[in-house]
Image (cartoon, grey):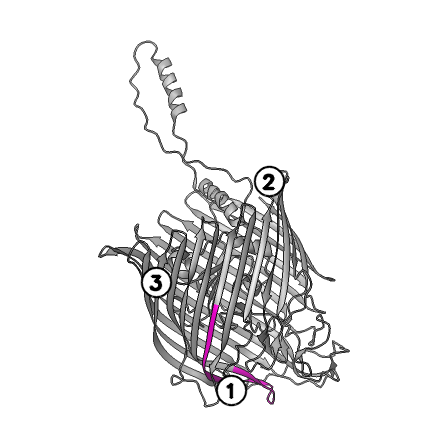
Amino acid sequence: MANAQSSVGLPAVTVESPTQRQKLARPAGPSAQRTQAAAARQRNQNATPAQPTPSERAAAAAAAQYEAKLGYRAMPSSTTLRTGASPLDTSQSVNIVPEQVIKDQLPRNLDDALVNISGVTQTNTLAGTQDAVIRRGFGDNRDGSVMRNGMPLVQGRSLNPAVESVEVLKGPASLLYGIMDPGGIVNTISKRPELYQHGSISVLGSTYGSKNGADATFDITGPIGKDGLAYRFIAYGVNEDYWRNFGRHRETLIAPSLAWYGENTTVQLNYEHRDFLSPFDRGTALDSRTNKPLAIPSTRRLDEPYNNMWGTSDLMQASVDHRLNEDWKLYAGYSYNTESFSANQLRITAVNPVTGIITRSNDGTRGSLSNVSYGTSYLQGGFWLGGMRNDVLFGGDAQYRTIYRKDLIRQTTPNVFNIYNPVYGLLQPGTTIAPTDSDQTDKLGTRALFFQDTLHLTNQLALVGGVRYMEYEQLAGRGRPFKANTNLTGDKVLPLGGAIYKVTEQISLYASYTQSLKPNSTIAPVDGGVIDSNVKPEEGVSWETGIKFDVNKRLSGTIALYDIDKKNVMVSQFNTATGSNDRRTAAAVRSRGVEIDVTGKLTDSWSMIGSYGYTDARVTEDPVLTGKALQNVALNTASLYLVYDFGTALPGRLRVGAGAHYVGDRPGDAANTFVLSSYIVADAFATYETKYETLPVIYQLNVKNLFDNVYYPSAVNRLNVAMGDARRVSLSATVKF
């Protein structure tokens, strides 16, 4: 991933106040010409310095921010909470993976980046092709919780070189985002056009043991003319071997964007086009004798080399920020995201760990198409009433989302495959289309109005109140002829309440009450017929309190305690007799926990990002699962990453960093019949910034999974246990211009 922030040799800009010109008397007599010349010279000496151009001001601002970014300064985007308020002035917690952390750690996907955030674990990634993160015990792939600049995505992978930072709004976010699990949302923030000319070219080589890869990134931005118009263009390509015994990852990204920065108005336009090919790897399976993963080499895949996913995604976004006056600002945004893919999905259906013989189904998907269209507009500002300040947010949004799978391939295979002595290449991709499983469709539409008011009772104490009114409809089902297994409509009023107490300008206490709503739905048949409006939606209620701090704009963080209750929850449980997942609604689940997140500078040389999460998430009422912990949710998670900056002690600038993240034991299925063992993964990096002639150059070495640990980050069932990535070493060179 390119280090796109130009940081060396930026011009310093000093803006001086204009001085009052003296009015000179008219010269007289024969020396008039000499006197006029002397007066002109004096005027030139006393002339007011030229005002800096927008490009010079932008370059100076970037230079001033560079050191803060190196120190892991967490600067939240206004799109996450829909306001520009400081985190200390809000009643909800937002945790940030800053821009520089992403540059240093080089995460390969969203799961990788979010190891820095408390209470986050991985869930079903659909064989490594989807973002799938659990927050505070809740979450799944395609649950609508992943955003770009505060607007929803449907593409499988959201982190790419066009993303600058990642923010996680914890807890129920339905007031601002509508239908959502109560764990929160993940907001990926785009790199934006800038008003000074700079760019970078980055080339990276990597190795997974004997497997190699390379990628390159080109990133350029600057002004167009002198009236506040700017552009940015990012191009990225990767071609690398997969770390297991076969597979390849190829991807290209083109991301142009435009921005206009007016005196009171900012307009942003961005587009991303992505082509991809990636392994469709369901990992390994359990040995029924030990309840542990099969005792075979971690590199050994149990499918075939043709198990891949390939496709394209497109993202188009536009937004306008307009300041009406000193107190009020209007925002409008629109986003359209679409992704199409096909996949070969040979999968295990049974394992005999004694003989090593497994049976497999030659499955696949053809003609998958997902899209989401989303628009929002809101007014944000403040006024005084009764001697008290009101900070108000009022707006609305609408969303239309479709997830469609055209041809589902289901084909039995007579091929005998032995996991202890595998022979590959005897099968070809399946071609038999199963009409009853095809035309899988999930359509969701929502429309809503929302209002929030922060009432400042004193300089220290503020109360927060808000409400969202939402209408929704959902249709889901499958089959030829098509059968709807979900067909419902509904509406809901969702409240929010909170309080903020500013202990000092650097420390605040907060408390909040929030609700969430998510209709129960499934494309598959369920007991009792169709899920309609008579089936209650999943509803969550959360209480949260904590401390936020931002010490000298260097070290910031949150300590949060929360309690979330959720009822009418859809539970999926693997049925060994049928080889499929059965679904039903559990009465209630609960998640309680403590979270600590800290990022920033410890000293002038040391920076850090760290977290700890305690998440006790379990079923509280259910005929079968009462008392069981929620699938893939770890009781304890922790991370710590430290960076030392040698500054100017060397001819160039050397920075070194290392850290690790820990994920505790967690159940691999809803019934808790097996447990995924805890693991620790350590990483390290070093960057050296110097100059080649006049051009800044950065060399960077990264080692992921430093000790090459074998670990299992998540499971879908006993036959589908994900494998964590092996050790990866990469070396990159970035030239800035």
Question: Is residue 726 visible to us here?
Answer: yes
Left or right of 627? Residue 517 is left
For the C terminus, the quadrant is: top right
Q: Which residue of the protein is positioned furthest toward the right in this rendering?
A: 421
Residue 26 highlighted magenta (yes or no): no
Are the two marked residues, 1 and 2, in contact with CB atoms closer than 8 angstroms? no
Write the start and end of the magenta stretch as one range. Answer: 572-593
Q: Amino acid at mark 1?
A: Val
Q: Position of residue 481 (x, y in %)?
A: 50, 87
| Residue 420 location, quadrant | bottom right
Q: Which mark sits nearer the N-terminus, 1 or 2?
A: 1
Number of callouts in the render? 3
Which of discs 2 and 3 lies nearer the camera? The answer is: 3
* Amino acid at the residue labelled 3: Ala
**Residue count near mark 3 (Cα–Cα under 10 Å), binned few <14, some 14–19, many ≥20:** many
Quadrant location of residue 319?
Answer: bottom left
Q: Secondary structure at mark 1?
A: loop
**Residue indicated by mark 3:** 499
Question: Which residue does the numbered mark 2 point to in the structure image?
Answer: 648
Distance from disc 1 to disc 2, alpha carbons, whole Å, reads 63 Å
Q: Is residue 515 above or below residue 694?
A: below
Looking at numbered disc 2 in the image, what kind of residue is underneath it?
Answer: Thr
Percent across and percent down for residue 79 are 42, 59
Which residue occupies 33% across, 9% down?
Answer: 30
